[in-house]
Image (cartoon, rainbow, N blue to C red):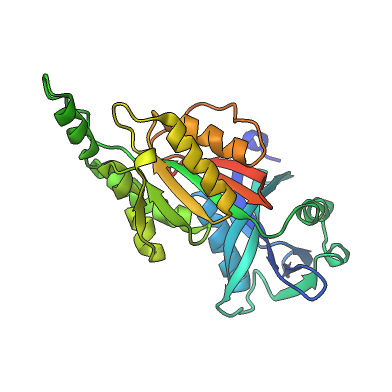
Amino acid sequence: MAEGTEALLIPAAGAVVWRPGRAGPEIVLVHRPRYDDWSYPKGKCEPGEHVLRTAIREVREETGLGVVLGRALSPSVYPTKAGTKHVSYWAARHIQSFGFVSNDEVDDVRWLPAATAHEQLTYERDVALLGEFRSGPASTVPMILLRHAAAGSKVAVAGDAAATAAADLARPLEAGGEADAKILAGLLASYGECQVISSAAQRCVATVRPYAETMGVPIQVEPAFTDTPGSAPDAGAERVTSLAASRVPTLICAHRENLPVLIDAAFTALGAGPPRAKPLGKGEFWVLQSASGELVSAERHDPDK
């Protein structure tokens, strides 16, 4: 290994792609002629590419399949000649087939029962990942909690609290926030179609609008998620608890001020303790995946990383 490469981290992403089978889930494996191995579809992140986009792209390029990401799985970290590769993995449900074309990188794709696929896998790390996949639910429900993207500064109207509150609700996204909203649409689409519930604030609605338009779903404005003078945090927490119990894929967009309460309520409703993490930055989001009303994975993403 060349001097210095031991410190080079190579980000990559992939998925354990599954579909329902007669005797349980079936998963897809790919054969790479260059290495004569069988593994999961995966690949390196392109410069500036988010790992969520990498996972979706690599699955489609290597298998011809469209997928929706489910619960996060443990990453695979291992040395290569170029540096240390860090592969982020998700369980991913097959939703569409675009057609596989054999090529120099992947020349065969096979669907196999998850119960026996370990016999085909080449690497022990992939066998361990299969065991993790099989030890949990294949199908999960996402709840995404998002902080709005960058907006203009607050403007106070001297002596008029009502006017100040109205002006705050009307604050639009900055140019950078609008760009992030478009990026977020692509990242959030990785988790499929969710109902979209937003604070009434313009900056929140504008943040989720590109995703809602992409998915073809309406934006539901929720007063309980709107941060205004005198708003009751308990109302927002109760609404989140109700949404978690509904087991419907859901995207919530709210504010720095009330998101900690909403996030804690979501974790608690799904049977987990509140996360010990710093507050979300603008445009950041939590993805909580649950099955049978219980949390099975939690991941946090920044659209710029």
**Quick check: 250 left or right of 35?**
left
Give 56 or 87, whichever is nearer the viewer: 56
Q: Quadrant of residue 10?
A: top right
Left or right, 9 with reference to 180: right
Residue drawn 61% across the image and 42% down it = 298
User: Which residue is nearer to you in this view: 264 or 172?
Assistant: 264
Relative image position of residue 150 (x, y in whole percent): 31, 37
Q: Quadrant of residue 277?
A: top right
Q: Which residue is pictured at 40% across the width and 55% down the height?
A: 185
Taking the view exactly as shown, the residue that stands out farthest to the left is: 158
Q: Is residue 160 visible?
A: yes
As drawn, 188 above or below 31: above
> Can residue 48 be seen here?
no
| Image spot of residue 134 (x, y percent) | 79, 57
Number of callouts: 0
Residue sitting at 66 percent across and 63 percent down? 41
- 223 to 93, vertically: above or below: above
Q: Is residue 229 left or right of residue 145?
A: left
Residue at 61% in and 49% down:
289
Q: Position of residue 173 (x, y in %)?
A: 25, 42
Residue 184, horizontal then vertical, whole percent: 41, 50
Q: Quadrant of the N terminus?
A: top right
- Residue in front for this viewpoint, 136 or 187: 136
